[in-house]
Amino acid sequence: MKIAWQNCSSLNDAEIVLFGVASSEASLYAGSEKAPQAIRAASLKYYAGSTLTGKRFVLNPENGPIKKKLYDIGDVFKDEVTEFVARIVDLRKLPAMLGGDHSCTLNALKGLASIA
């Protein structure tokens, strides 16, 4: 399942690369590893359809349409986050992470720091 606001079909076309990390290793709460898919599923609530045409479309997020090209690449493993973020930034794209537990953020920051 992809996020509803994905508006391009490849990594090459993307300006923002969304990825999930289904991890709950350092979480105090059970089920946090399900967060990336739960967020993607919740985004589908913003779909609407036309009974006349039968076509479905994505409603704009709360702050208006996403003007950047967004691509949801899927999930990566927690131990791959540092290298993955560094690779995305090296491609001149903005990484956006959907995480399960907060310890994934440190790995993402290490990926950003590796290019600075």
Image (cartoon, rainbow, N blue to C red):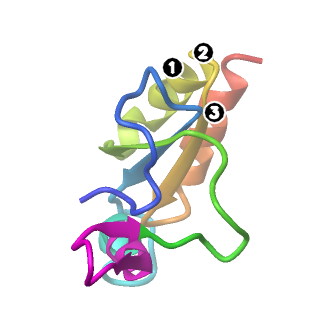
What secondary structure is found at the residue carrying circle 2? helix
- 113 or 96, which lies in front? 96
- The answer to whether residue 15 is above or below residue 61 is above
Q: Is residue 55 left or right of residue 57?
A: left
Q: CA distance from mark 3 to mark 1?
A: 12 Å
Q: Which residues are magenta?
A: 41-57
Between tags 3 and 2, which lies in front? 2
Question: In percent of the image, x 44 and y 65: which residue is there?
Answer: 26
Tag 3: Cα neighbours inside 10 Å, few (<14), some, or many (≥20)? some
Q: Is residue 46 visible?
A: yes
Q: Are marks 3 and 1 in contact (CB under 8 Å)?
A: no
Q: Position of residue 97 (x, y in %)?
A: 52, 51
Task: Measure how far apart labels 3 and 2 are at the Cα level.
Answer: 14 Å
Q: Earlier in the sequence, mark 3 or mark 2?
A: 2
The question of residue 102 being in magenta is answered with no
Amino acid, disc 3: Lys
- Seen at 31% across and 43% down, the residue is 77
Q: Residue at x 71, y 26 (%)?
A: 113
The residues tagged by marks 1 and 2 sit, at their Cα atoms, a distance apart of 5 Å
Q: Which residue in the protein does label 3 denote?
A: 110
Residue 80 placement: quadrant:
top left
Is there CB contact under 8 Å for labels 3 and 2?
Answer: no
Q: Residues within 10 Å of mark 2 (few under 14, many from 20)?
A: few
Q: Nearer the viewer, residue 91 or 102?
A: 91
Side (left or right) of 35 relative to 105: left
Mark 1 residue element: helix
* Residue 50 lies in the magenta-colored region: yes
The residue where tag 1 is placed is 87
How many numbered dots are placed on residues in this image?
A: 3
Q: Which residue is mark 2?
A: 90
Q: Amino acid at mark 2?
A: Asp
Q: Secondary structure at mark 3?
A: helix
